Image (spheres, rainbow, N blue to C red):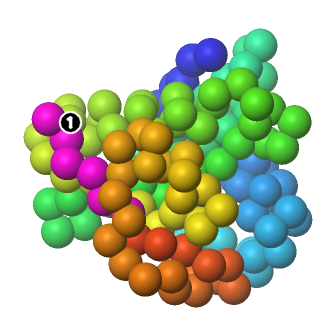
Amino acid sequence: MKYKRVTEEKDLQKVFEIRKEIFVKEQEVAEEEEFDKFDSLDAPCDHILVYYDNKPVGTGRIRVVEEVGKLERICVLKSYRKYGLGKTIVQSLEEMAVEKGLTRVKLHGQTHAEGFYHKLGYETVSEEFMEDGIPHYLMTKRMN
C-alpha cells in the first residue's frame, strides 16, 4: 500500500473515476454535487491516490479552512475496503496537515463510518446532519 500526491492531470482523472464510482454510482450523489471548484490541480487543496497492487483504488483530499485541515472525499473502491486503505488515506492526509503546520483537522464523516474515525482518534462534535442526502457528523482531531 502506498499513496501518491496528485500532481498530474492523468492522476487527477483517476481520482475522479474512483469518486464517480463510489459517490455518484454507489451512493447516488448527484455528479454536480460531487465535483466542485477544488477539483483541479491549481485549486488550493491536495489530492492523493492510494494504490493496492499498483492499482489506484482510493483517494482523498485536504484543504485548509480557517487554519484547520479539512479532510474530504475519502473513499476506497468497494472490493478493496478490507485492506486498511481508508486508514492509510486518513493518516496520509493527516501527515500533509502536519507538514502544512496545522494543529487540527476535521471532516464530515458519514454516520456509518463514525466508529472507523473514532478508532483513528477523531471526536464527534456535532449532531447528525444531512449532506448530499447522506447522514454525516462533524468530527475533529488535534494533531500533536
Q: Residue at x 52, y 29 (%)?
A: 88
Q: Quadrant of the C terminus?
A: top left
**Crowding at mark 1 (Cα within 10 Å: few <14, some 14-19, many 20+):** some
In the picture provided, is 19 more to the left or to the right than 114? right
Q: Which segment is the magenta one?
A: 139-144
Residue under circle 1? 98
Q: Is residue 6 visible?
A: no
**Against 80, is 72 above or below?**
below
Q: Residue at x 54, y 52 (%)?
A: 115
**Chief secondary structure of the magenta portion:** strand
Q: Amino acid at mark 1?
A: Val
**Residue 71 belongs to the span the image colors magenta:** no
**Against 135, is 4 above or below?**
above
Q: Foreground residue, 34 or 39?
A: 34
Using the rendered view, name the quadrant where residue 135 is placed: bottom right
Q: Residue 122 location, x and y as percent?
A: 36, 51
Q: Secondary structure at mark 1?
A: helix
Q: Foreground residue, 144 or 31?
A: 144
Q: Residue at x 83, y 74 (%)?
A: 28
Q: Quadrant of the N terminus?
A: top right
Q: Residue at x 87, y 65 (%)?
A: 25
**Residue 140 belongs to the span the image colors magenta:** yes
Q: Residue 50 location, x and y as percent?
A: 61, 29
